[in-house]
Image (cartoon, grey):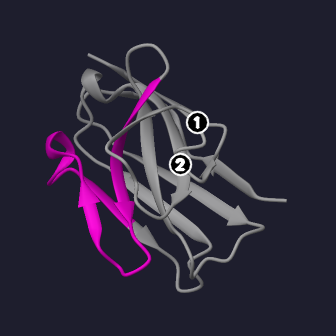
């Protein structure tokens, strides 16, 4: 059974930092990359950052220079260090495991291989 379990969300003031973690299990890590989406309007999820299986890293334009994605050596855990948070970053962040990582997707849709349940990030001004 595939599981992606997120942790590390919470409430911070603008300018603060949070570190999200996602532990994966039940799938072959060499076959898929891991990354983070956040829920935007309605049930739409935008890709925030990802590490593809070939090591290619992606950051959404607005988080470049503030967020850093990393993965442990076994590739079972992915982290998202978020610095200089703004109220615009507030969202539910969902861990995902996928091959292609579409920039936009319906949250929890099968277009992305696997999804976590999400963790709430709240940023107050």
**Rendered image: mark on residue 62:** none
**Total numbered labels:** 2
> Is 77 displayed left or right of 124 in the figure?
right
The secondary structure type at the circle numbered 2 is loop
**In the rendered image, which quarter is residue 1 located in?**
bottom right
**Residue 35 in picture, x, y percent from top left:** 45, 57
In the rendered view, would you say 100 is above or below 103?
Answer: below
Q: Which residues are magenta?
A: 44-69
**Residue 91 in picture, x, y percent from top left:** 43, 26
> Is 12 displayed left or right of 28 in the figure?
left
**Residue pointed to by mark 1:** 109
The secondary structure type at the circle numbered 1 is loop
In the rendered view, would you say 87 is above or below 47?
Answer: above
**In the rendered image, which quarter is residue 110 located in?**
top right
Please name the residue shown 52% across and 78% down the image: 72
In the rendered view, would you say 32 is above or below 47?
Answer: below
Q: Are marks 1 and 2 in contact (CB under 8 Å)?
A: yes
**Residue pointed to by mark 2:** 112
Quadrant of the rendering where the C terminus is positioned? top left
> Is 68 displayed left or right of 64 in the figure?
right
Residue that lies at the very extreme toward the bottom in this rendered image:
73
**In the rendered image, which quarter is residue 97 located in?**
bottom right
Please name the residue shown 59% across and 57% down the image: 22
């Amino acid at each position: 059974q595939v599981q992606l379990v997120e942790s590390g969300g919470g409430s911070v003031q603008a300018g603060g930092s949070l570190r999200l973690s996602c532990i994966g299990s039940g799938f072959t890590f060499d076959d898929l990359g891991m990354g983070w989406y956040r829920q935007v309007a309605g049930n739409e999820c935008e890709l925030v950052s990802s590490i593809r299986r070939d090591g290619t890293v992606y950051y959404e334009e607005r988080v470049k220079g503030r967020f850093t994605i990393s993965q442990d050596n076994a590739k079972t855990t992915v982290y998202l260090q978020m610095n200089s948070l703004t109220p615009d970053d507030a969202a539910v962040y969902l861990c995902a495991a996928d091959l292609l990582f579409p920039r936009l997707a319906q949250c929890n849709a099968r277009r992305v291989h696997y999804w976590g349940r999400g963790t709430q990030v709240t940023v107050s001004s």
